[in-house]
Image: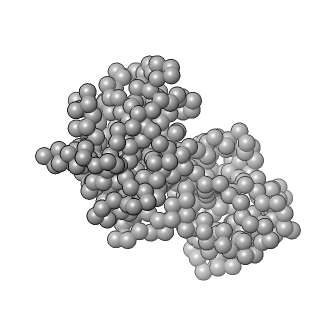
Amino acid sequence: MKFLQILRKAATSPQNRHRVSSFSANNGRRFFSHLHSQPPPPASFGIAFDIDGVILRGETPIGGSKQALKRLYDESGNMSIPYVFLTNGGGVPESERAAELSKLLSVRILASQVIQGHSPFMQLVNRFENELIIAVGKGEPAKVMSEYGFKNVLSLDEYASYFEHIDPLGKFKNSTSQLAGCKKYSSKETDSENGPPSQRVEAVFIVSDSVDWSRDIQVLCDILSTGGLPGREISTQPPLYFANDDLSYQGLFPTERLGMGAFRIALESIYNRVHPNALEYASYGKPNPSVFKNAENILMQSICHPVEGQNPLKTLYMVGDNLLVDIKGAQQAGQPWFSILTRSGVFKGKGNHPVYPADLVVDTVEEAVDYILSKETLQT
Protein backbone atom coordinates (compact mmCIF):
# COMPACT_ATOMS: atom_id res chain seq x y z
CA MET A 1 0.00 0.00 0.00
CA LYS A 2 1.04 3.58 -0.59
CA PHE A 3 1.44 4.45 3.09
CA LEU A 4 3.75 1.45 3.61
CA GLN A 5 5.99 2.75 0.85
CA ILE A 6 6.06 6.11 2.59
CA LEU A 7 6.81 4.43 5.92
CA ARG A 8 9.70 2.41 4.49
CA LYS A 9 11.15 5.51 2.86
CA ALA A 10 10.85 7.49 6.08
CA ALA A 11 12.36 4.74 8.18
CA THR A 12 15.50 4.57 6.06
CA SER A 13 16.02 8.34 5.84
CA PRO A 14 18.41 9.90 8.40
CA GLN A 15 16.23 13.01 8.39
CA ASN A 16 13.11 11.23 9.62
CA ARG A 17 13.42 11.04 13.37
CA HIS A 18 10.84 10.50 16.08
CA ARG A 19 11.12 13.33 18.54
CA VAL A 20 10.21 13.09 22.21
CA SER A 21 10.15 15.89 24.74
CA SER A 22 8.38 17.00 27.89
CA PHE A 23 6.45 20.19 28.26
CA SER A 24 3.82 21.63 30.55
CA ALA A 25 0.68 23.48 29.57
CA ASN A 26 0.68 27.02 30.92
CA ASN A 27 -1.72 28.70 28.49
CA GLY A 28 -4.91 27.91 26.68
CA ARG A 29 -6.62 26.24 29.64
CA ARG A 30 -10.03 26.91 28.22
CA PHE A 31 -9.30 25.21 24.90
CA PHE A 32 -10.83 21.78 24.33
CA SER A 33 -13.04 22.27 27.37
CA HIS A 34 -15.91 20.97 25.24
CA LEU A 35 -14.12 17.64 24.97
CA HIS A 36 -13.84 17.01 28.70
CA SER A 37 -17.22 15.31 28.78
CA GLN A 38 -16.04 12.80 26.19
CA PRO A 39 -13.76 9.77 26.73
CA PRO A 40 -10.09 10.75 26.54
CA PRO A 41 -8.48 10.05 23.17
CA PRO A 42 -6.13 7.06 23.32
CA ALA A 43 -3.52 8.63 21.03
CA SER A 44 -0.07 9.52 22.33
CA PHE A 45 0.48 12.01 19.51
CA GLY A 46 -1.13 15.11 18.04
CA ILE A 47 -1.33 16.78 14.64
CA ALA A 48 -1.31 20.40 13.48
CA PHE A 49 -2.56 21.04 9.93
CA ASP A 50 -2.01 24.10 7.83
CA ILE A 51 -5.16 24.95 5.83
CA ASP A 52 -4.46 26.76 2.56
CA GLY A 53 -2.59 24.50 0.15
CA VAL A 54 -2.89 21.49 2.46
CA ILE A 55 -6.53 21.03 3.45
CA LEU A 56 -8.23 23.49 1.09
CA ARG A 57 -7.58 25.50 -2.03
CA GLY A 58 -10.06 28.33 -1.81
CA GLU A 59 -13.15 26.54 -0.51
CA THR A 60 -12.40 23.22 -2.19
CA PRO A 61 -10.96 20.29 -0.19
CA ILE A 62 -7.72 18.96 -1.73
CA GLY A 63 -5.36 16.05 -1.32
CA GLY A 64 -7.97 13.69 0.12
CA SER A 65 -8.35 15.96 3.16
CA LYS A 66 -11.96 14.99 3.90
CA GLN A 67 -11.13 11.29 4.00
CA ALA A 68 -7.95 11.94 5.99
CA LEU A 69 -9.70 13.94 8.70
CA LYS A 70 -12.50 11.39 9.09
CA ARG A 71 -9.87 8.86 10.13
CA LEU A 72 -9.17 11.00 13.20
CA TYR A 73 -12.68 10.33 14.60
CA ASP A 74 -14.24 7.22 16.06
CA GLU A 75 -17.43 5.56 14.82
CA SER A 76 -19.55 7.82 17.01
CA GLY A 77 -18.08 10.95 15.46
CA ASN A 78 -15.94 11.84 18.47
CA MET A 79 -12.37 12.95 17.88
CA SER A 80 -9.99 10.10 18.69
CA ILE A 81 -6.75 11.75 17.52
CA PRO A 82 -6.13 15.25 18.89
CA TYR A 83 -5.49 17.77 16.14
CA VAL A 84 -5.69 21.49 15.43
CA PHE A 85 -5.60 23.77 12.41
CA LEU A 86 -2.55 26.01 12.66
CA THR A 87 -2.91 28.69 10.01
CA ASN A 88 -1.57 32.17 9.38
CA GLY A 89 -4.85 33.04 7.69
CA GLY A 90 -7.75 34.80 9.36
CA GLY A 91 -10.11 37.72 9.11
CA VAL A 92 -13.10 36.05 10.84
CA PRO A 93 -13.61 34.84 14.42
CA GLU A 94 -12.38 31.33 15.21
CA SER A 95 -15.94 30.16 15.82
CA GLU A 96 -17.01 31.18 12.32
CA ARG A 97 -13.94 29.60 10.75
CA ALA A 98 -14.63 26.36 12.63
CA ALA A 99 -18.23 26.30 11.38
CA GLU A 100 -17.04 26.90 7.82
CA LEU A 101 -14.43 24.13 8.03
CA SER A 102 -16.96 21.72 9.53
CA LYS A 103 -19.28 22.28 6.58
CA LEU A 104 -16.56 21.99 3.93
CA LEU A 105 -14.87 18.94 5.47
CA SER A 106 -17.94 17.10 6.83
CA VAL A 107 -16.53 16.64 10.34
CA ARG A 108 -17.26 18.37 13.64
CA ILE A 109 -14.62 21.02 14.29
CA LEU A 110 -14.57 23.17 17.44
CA ALA A 111 -13.50 26.80 17.61
CA SER A 112 -10.78 25.71 20.04
CA GLN A 113 -9.20 23.65 17.25
CA VAL A 114 -8.69 26.70 15.04
CA ILE A 115 -5.52 28.71 15.70
CA GLN A 116 -5.31 31.66 13.31
CA GLY A 117 -2.55 34.16 12.73
CA HIS A 118 -4.33 36.79 14.82
CA SER A 119 -5.33 34.45 17.67
CA PRO A 120 -2.38 35.66 19.84
CA PHE A 121 -3.79 39.21 19.69
CA MET A 122 -6.19 38.24 22.48
CA GLN A 123 -3.17 38.24 24.81
CA LEU A 124 -2.95 42.03 24.38
CA VAL A 125 -6.49 42.80 25.56
CA ASN A 126 -5.39 43.89 29.04
CA ARG A 127 -3.01 46.43 27.51
CA PHE A 128 -5.41 48.00 25.01
CA GLU A 129 -8.87 46.97 26.25
CA ASN A 130 -10.36 50.47 26.41
CA GLU A 131 -8.00 52.27 24.04
CA LEU A 132 -8.85 53.21 20.47
CA ILE A 133 -7.29 50.61 18.18
CA ILE A 134 -7.50 50.15 14.41
CA ALA A 135 -8.03 46.71 12.82
CA VAL A 136 -6.89 46.24 9.22
CA GLY A 137 -7.68 43.60 6.63
CA LYS A 138 -10.21 41.58 4.69
CA GLY A 139 -13.20 39.92 6.27
CA GLU A 140 -14.34 41.28 9.63
CA PRO A 141 -11.20 42.49 11.43
CA ALA A 142 -13.05 44.77 13.85
CA LYS A 143 -15.44 41.96 14.80
CA VAL A 144 -12.49 39.64 15.43
CA MET A 145 -10.89 42.12 17.81
CA SER A 146 -14.19 42.93 19.52
CA GLU A 147 -14.79 39.26 20.25
CA TYR A 148 -11.32 39.04 21.78
CA GLY A 149 -12.43 41.71 24.29
CA PHE A 150 -11.18 45.01 22.80
CA LYS A 151 -13.87 47.57 23.58
CA ASN A 152 -12.92 50.52 21.36
CA VAL A 153 -11.98 49.13 17.94
CA LEU A 154 -12.61 50.42 14.42
CA SER A 155 -11.81 48.84 11.10
CA LEU A 156 -9.52 50.91 8.90
CA ASP A 157 -12.39 51.14 6.41
CA GLU A 158 -14.57 52.93 8.93
CA TYR A 159 -11.75 54.97 10.45
CA ALA A 160 -10.69 56.39 7.07
CA SER A 161 -14.29 57.37 6.32
CA TYR A 162 -14.14 60.03 9.07
CA PHE A 163 -11.33 61.92 7.29
CA GLU A 164 -12.24 63.80 4.14
CA HIS A 165 -9.62 63.51 1.39
CA ILE A 166 -7.34 61.19 3.45
CA ASP A 167 -7.36 58.81 0.49
CA PRO A 168 -6.58 60.90 -2.62
CA LEU A 169 -7.78 58.06 -4.84
CA GLY A 170 -10.98 57.48 -2.91
CA LYS A 171 -13.18 59.20 -5.48
CA PHE A 172 -12.16 56.57 -8.02
CA LYS A 173 -13.19 53.70 -5.76
CA ASN A 174 -16.50 52.21 -4.73
CA SER A 175 -16.23 52.12 -0.94
CA THR A 176 -19.84 51.14 -0.29
CA SER A 177 -19.04 47.46 -0.03
CA GLN A 178 -16.04 48.12 2.22
CA LEU A 179 -18.11 50.05 4.75
CA ALA A 180 -21.10 47.73 4.74
CA GLY A 181 -21.69 46.35 8.22
CA CYS A 182 -18.57 47.76 9.82
CA LYS A 183 -20.37 50.29 12.05
CA LYS A 184 -22.16 47.62 14.03
CA TYR A 185 -18.79 46.53 15.43
CA SER A 186 -17.90 50.03 16.68
CA SER A 187 -17.70 49.85 20.44
CA LYS A 188 -18.63 53.47 21.21
CA GLU A 189 -20.97 56.07 19.82
CA THR A 190 -19.18 59.06 18.33
CA ASP A 191 -20.04 62.63 17.40
CA SER A 192 -18.37 65.27 15.28
CA GLU A 193 -16.45 66.79 18.19
CA ASN A 194 -15.43 63.66 20.07
CA GLY A 195 -15.25 61.22 17.16
CA PRO A 196 -12.27 59.23 15.91
CA PRO A 197 -10.44 62.23 14.34
CA SER A 198 -10.05 63.74 17.82
CA GLN A 199 -9.04 60.48 19.54
CA ARG A 200 -5.49 59.17 19.57
CA VAL A 201 -5.02 55.75 18.02
CA GLU A 202 -3.10 53.73 20.60
CA ALA A 203 -2.31 50.67 18.47
CA VAL A 204 -2.79 49.22 14.99
CA PHE A 205 -3.42 45.53 14.29
CA ILE A 206 -3.03 44.03 10.81
CA VAL A 207 -5.54 41.23 11.33
CA SER A 208 -5.70 39.88 7.77
CA ASP A 209 -4.55 40.70 4.24
CA SER A 210 -5.10 44.28 3.16
CA VAL A 211 -7.72 44.72 0.42
CA ASP A 212 -6.70 48.24 -0.64
CA TRP A 213 -2.93 48.59 -0.41
CA SER A 214 -2.74 52.19 -1.65
CA ARG A 215 -5.36 53.48 0.80
CA ASP A 216 -4.17 51.39 3.73
CA ILE A 217 -0.49 52.32 3.35
CA GLN A 218 -1.40 56.00 3.08
CA VAL A 219 -3.64 56.00 6.16
CA LEU A 220 -1.25 53.83 8.19
CA CYS A 221 1.62 56.21 7.43
CA ASP A 222 -0.62 59.05 8.64
CA ILE A 223 -1.50 57.23 11.86
CA LEU A 224 1.94 55.88 12.66
CA SER A 225 3.95 59.03 11.90
CA THR A 226 1.76 61.37 13.98
CA GLY A 227 1.41 59.36 17.16
CA GLY A 228 -2.09 58.24 16.23
CA LEU A 229 -3.51 61.63 15.19
CA PRO A 230 -3.55 61.87 11.37
CA GLY A 231 -2.99 65.38 10.01
CA ARG A 232 -1.10 66.52 13.10
CA GLU A 233 2.62 67.00 13.76
CA ILE A 234 5.20 64.20 13.70
CA SER A 235 5.17 62.24 16.96
CA THR A 236 6.02 58.90 18.56
CA GLN A 237 4.79 55.87 16.64
CA PRO A 238 2.04 53.80 18.29
CA PRO A 239 2.55 50.00 18.41
CA LEU A 240 1.97 48.06 15.19
CA TYR A 241 1.21 44.33 15.12
CA PHE A 242 1.03 41.93 12.17
CA ALA A 243 -0.86 38.62 12.40
CA ASN A 244 1.78 36.97 10.20
CA ASP A 245 4.72 37.72 7.94
CA ASP A 246 3.96 35.38 5.02
CA LEU A 247 5.52 36.67 1.83
CA SER A 248 3.22 34.50 -0.29
CA TYR A 249 0.55 31.80 -0.09
CA GLN A 250 -1.19 29.36 -2.42
CA GLY A 251 -4.60 30.55 -3.56
CA LEU A 252 -6.77 29.58 -6.51
CA PHE A 253 -4.34 31.03 -9.06
CA PRO A 254 -1.71 28.53 -10.29
CA THR A 255 1.20 30.46 -8.74
CA GLU A 256 1.49 31.95 -5.24
CA ARG A 257 -0.12 35.26 -4.32
CA LEU A 258 1.49 38.04 -2.28
CA GLY A 259 0.62 37.86 1.41
CA MET A 260 0.80 39.99 4.53
CA GLY A 261 4.59 39.84 4.57
CA ALA A 262 4.68 41.54 1.18
CA PHE A 263 2.32 44.24 2.47
CA ARG A 264 4.58 44.72 5.49
CA ILE A 265 7.61 45.16 3.22
CA ALA A 266 5.76 47.75 1.12
CA LEU A 267 4.55 49.68 4.18
CA GLU A 268 7.97 49.58 5.85
CA SER A 269 9.81 50.71 2.70
CA ILE A 270 7.52 53.69 2.14
CA TYR A 271 7.33 54.67 5.81
CA ASN A 272 11.11 54.62 6.18
CA ARG A 273 11.48 56.88 3.15
CA VAL A 274 9.07 59.56 4.37
CA HIS A 275 9.65 59.41 8.14
CA PRO A 276 12.91 60.11 9.99
CA ASN A 277 12.56 57.07 12.29
CA ALA A 278 12.40 53.48 11.09
CA LEU A 279 9.10 51.61 11.38
CA GLU A 280 8.76 49.48 14.49
CA TYR A 281 6.48 46.45 14.50
CA ALA A 282 5.92 42.96 15.90
CA SER A 283 4.89 39.94 13.80
CA TYR A 284 3.03 36.89 15.02
CA GLY A 285 2.05 33.67 13.25
CA LYS A 286 4.20 30.83 11.98
CA PRO A 287 7.19 30.31 12.06
CA ASN A 288 7.29 32.07 15.44
CA PRO A 289 8.20 29.38 18.04
CA SER A 290 5.64 30.80 20.47
CA VAL A 291 2.89 29.84 18.01
CA PHE A 292 4.01 26.21 18.05
CA LYS A 293 4.32 26.26 21.83
CA ASN A 294 0.76 27.53 22.05
CA ALA A 295 -0.37 24.72 19.73
CA GLU A 296 1.37 22.22 22.04
CA ASN A 297 -0.49 23.61 25.02
CA ILE A 298 -3.82 23.49 23.23
CA LEU A 299 -3.28 19.90 22.09
CA MET A 300 -2.41 19.01 25.68
CA GLN A 301 -5.89 20.09 26.72
CA SER A 302 -7.30 17.19 24.68
CA ILE A 303 -6.05 14.91 27.45
CA CYS A 304 -8.63 14.85 30.22
CA HIS A 305 -6.29 14.14 33.11
CA PRO A 306 -2.68 14.77 32.11
CA VAL A 307 -0.10 13.98 34.78
CA GLU A 308 1.74 17.12 35.84
CA GLY A 309 5.32 17.12 34.56
CA GLN A 310 4.61 14.40 31.99
CA ASN A 311 3.75 14.75 28.33
CA PRO A 312 1.30 12.10 27.11
CA LEU A 313 1.71 13.39 23.52
CA LYS A 314 5.14 12.06 22.60
CA THR A 315 5.15 13.40 19.03
CA LEU A 316 3.48 16.41 17.44
CA TYR A 317 3.21 16.43 13.65
CA MET A 318 3.17 19.65 11.64
CA VAL A 319 1.67 19.09 8.18
CA GLY A 320 2.22 22.07 5.89
CA ASP A 321 3.08 23.20 2.37
CA ASN A 322 5.37 26.16 3.11
CA LEU A 323 9.04 25.51 3.88
CA LEU A 324 9.75 28.94 5.33
CA VAL A 325 6.64 28.96 7.51
CA ASP A 326 5.48 25.45 8.44
CA ILE A 327 8.70 23.45 8.23
CA LYS A 328 11.05 26.15 9.50
CA GLY A 329 8.66 26.83 12.36
CA ALA A 330 8.47 23.18 13.41
CA GLN A 331 12.24 22.86 13.27
CA GLN A 332 12.78 25.99 15.35
CA ALA A 333 10.25 24.75 17.89
CA GLY A 334 12.28 21.53 18.25
CA GLN A 335 11.11 18.44 20.10
CA PRO A 336 8.52 16.96 20.06
CA TRP A 337 7.71 18.39 16.60
CA PHE A 338 8.03 16.27 13.43
CA SER A 339 7.61 18.17 10.15
CA ILE A 340 5.78 16.82 7.11
CA LEU A 341 5.88 18.82 3.86
CA THR A 342 3.19 18.36 1.20
CA ARG A 343 3.54 19.11 -2.51
CA SER A 344 -0.05 20.34 -2.76
CA GLY A 345 0.49 24.07 -2.20
CA VAL A 346 3.42 26.48 -2.13
CA PHE A 347 5.97 23.65 -2.33
CA LYS A 348 5.95 21.64 -5.54
CA GLY A 349 9.52 20.36 -5.67
CA LYS A 350 10.55 16.78 -6.26
CA GLY A 351 13.09 16.51 -3.45
CA ASN A 352 13.56 18.12 -0.07
CA HIS A 353 14.91 21.55 0.81
CA PRO A 354 18.66 21.96 1.43
CA VAL A 355 18.31 24.63 4.14
CA TYR A 356 15.05 23.62 5.87
CA PRO A 357 14.60 19.93 5.03
CA ALA A 358 11.35 18.46 6.28
CA ASP A 359 11.40 15.22 8.26
CA LEU A 360 9.15 13.77 5.56
CA VAL A 361 7.94 14.90 2.12
CA VAL A 362 4.66 13.58 0.68
CA ASP A 363 2.30 14.55 -2.12
CA THR A 364 -0.90 15.09 -0.13
CA VAL A 365 -2.31 15.44 3.37
CA GLU A 366 -3.95 12.03 2.97
CA GLU A 367 -0.51 10.47 2.52
CA ALA A 368 0.70 12.39 5.57
CA VAL A 369 -2.10 10.96 7.72
CA ASP A 370 -1.43 7.48 6.26
CA TYR A 371 2.17 7.76 7.40
CA ILE A 372 1.32 9.12 10.86
CA LEU A 373 -1.29 6.51 11.68
CA SER A 374 0.78 3.60 10.37
CA LYS A 375 3.89 4.79 12.22
CA GLU A 376 2.06 5.31 15.51
CA THR A 377 0.27 1.95 15.18
CA LEU A 378 3.56 0.13 14.72
CA GLN A 379 5.01 1.81 17.81
CA THR A 380 2.12 0.85 20.13
Image coordinates for residue 184, horizontal then vertical, percent: 62, 51
Specify whether 259 is left or right of 43.
right
Specify whether 216 is left or right of 177.
right
Image coordinates for residue 87, horizontal then vertical, percent: 46, 50
Specify whether 187 is left or right of 112.
right
Image coordinates for residue 125, horizontal then vertical, percent: 67, 41
Residue at point 58%, 70% (across, down): 212
On screen, residue 40 above or below 257: above
* Nearest to the observer: residue 104 or residue 189: 104
Residue at point 46%, 53% (across, down): 328
Image coordinates for residue 186, horizontal then vertical, percent: 67, 51
Q: How is the image coloured?
A: one colour
Residue at point 64%, 79% (across, down): 169
Q: Residue furthest right?
A: 233
Quick one: quadrant of the C terminus?
top left
Instruction: Place residue 47 in its image quadrant.
Output: top left
On screen, residue 360 above or below 349: above
Q: Can see residue 206?
A: yes
Instruction: Place residue 29 in its image quadrant.
Output: top right
* Nearest to the observer: residue 144 or residue 225: 225
On screen, residue 28 above or below 94: above
Instruction: Place residue 346 in its image quadrant.
Output: bottom left
* Nearest to the observer: residue 310 or residue 97: 310
Specify whether 364 is left or right of 272.
left
How many numbered tags mark residues here?
Answer: 0
* Nearest to the observer: residue 273 or residue 17: 17
Q: Can see residue 195?
A: no
Residue at point 34%, 21% (across, down): 39
Q: Residue furthest left?
A: 1
